[in-house]
Image (cartoon, rainbow, N blue to C red):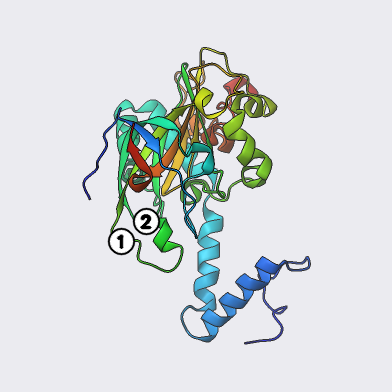
Amino acid sequence: MREDHHDQPHAPDHPMTEFEWRVDAVQALLIEKGVITADEVRRAVEEMDARTPAQGARVVARAWVDPAFKARLLADAKATIAEIGITVGFDATIVAVENTEKVHHAVVCTLCSCYPRGLLGYPPDWYKSLNYRSRAVVEPRSVLSEFGLELRSDVEVRVLDSTADMRYLVIPVRPAGTEGMSEEELADLVTRDSMIGVAQARTPALR
Amino acid sequence: MSARFKAGDRVRVRVGSPPGHFRTPAYVQDKIGAVERFHGDYRNPESLAYGGDGLPRRPLYLVRFPQSQLWPKYTGPARDQLLMDIFEHWLEPA
């Protein structure tokens, strides 16, 4: 094994943490033993970096304009997402849940940071924080309020703690005043946070 | 494996902290919930975490719990729910 890893382009500029050293060492060994190649690692990083919330926004916008698509999405998200040319990849199963005027879903992973990365890309830092992970299940309305989202008491708050193979995608409520907008314009209103359930979709006036 | 529970069934979460990796947080253990949906059969993470094959696959459910039952001091409306994925071997009829 090489003694010095500073020649690696992926090495961070800051002093490496114990976990970074460990990942670095395992990767170097796997390459040295011919299990994987450096180019495969690079491609995997490139592919992951290419995934963004824009993919999820396309899915939500289609669900807003096409009730049959939405019904299929709620029944079998992974297969339905593939219909519009998005390959989620990874082994996890995507499950879509719908927010309405009466029900509001928000997603957390208390055990670690499970997130529909294959669809939305990397999770935001706050999603991985101990503060969000511990408080979102205990006092969700307070946490949502801190994000600027006040929900009426007649709205049922449903917090999803993704502890296993399911990766939840929230379909936010379609904002009022968006009748007649194109699917592409609608997708622009669908933010990452609205698909985690800590915010509503943007209204056209606030774009 | 055939699923033992169906949507609507009342279930109690088993109590336990087996050595190693498991996905059933302490805060739902011994709590009673209702099956929201059956997800299908999935590899067992308690085996996968240690290089096992996770087989046989285990039935996995989405279970909902009223927040007020999980947290005695919950201040939100009684209708608020917590939903969690739980493997069948952690559930018993309630």
Dot 2 amino acid type: Asn
Residue B43 vs A105, above or below: the answer is below
Q: Are marks 2 and 1 in contact (CB under 8 Å)?
A: yes
A49 or A33: which is nearer to us? A33
Q: Where is residue A149 shown, x and y percent of the image?
A: 63, 23
Callout 2 crowding tier (Cα within 10 Å): few <14, some 14–19, many ≥20: many
Q: Where is residue B24 shown, x and y percent of the image?
A: 47, 46
- Is residue B7 left or right of A200 when viewed as pictured? left
Say which mark, if any, is on residue B44.
Answer: 2
Q: Label 1 is found on which chain of the structure? A: B
Q: Along the polypeptide, which appears first: circle 2 or circle 1?
A: 2
Q: Which residue is mark 1?
A: B55
Residue at point 60%, 31% (across, down): A138
Q: Label 2 is found on which chain of the structure? A: B
Specify the farthest residue to the left. Answer: B2
- Is residue A185 left or right of B14 when viewed as pictured? right
Residue at point 57%, 75% (across, down): A27
Q: Disc 2 on helix, strand or loop?
A: loop
Please identify the quadrant where the C terminus of chain A is shown: top right
A52 or A71: which is nearer to us? A71
Count how many numbered circles sit on residues in the image: 2
Per the model, the C-alpha gap separating discs 2 and 1 is 7 Å
Dot 1 amino acid type: Leu
Say which mark, if any, is on residue A90.
Answer: none
A81 or A116: which is nearer to us? A116
Q: Where is residue B22 shown, x and y percent of the image?
A: 47, 53
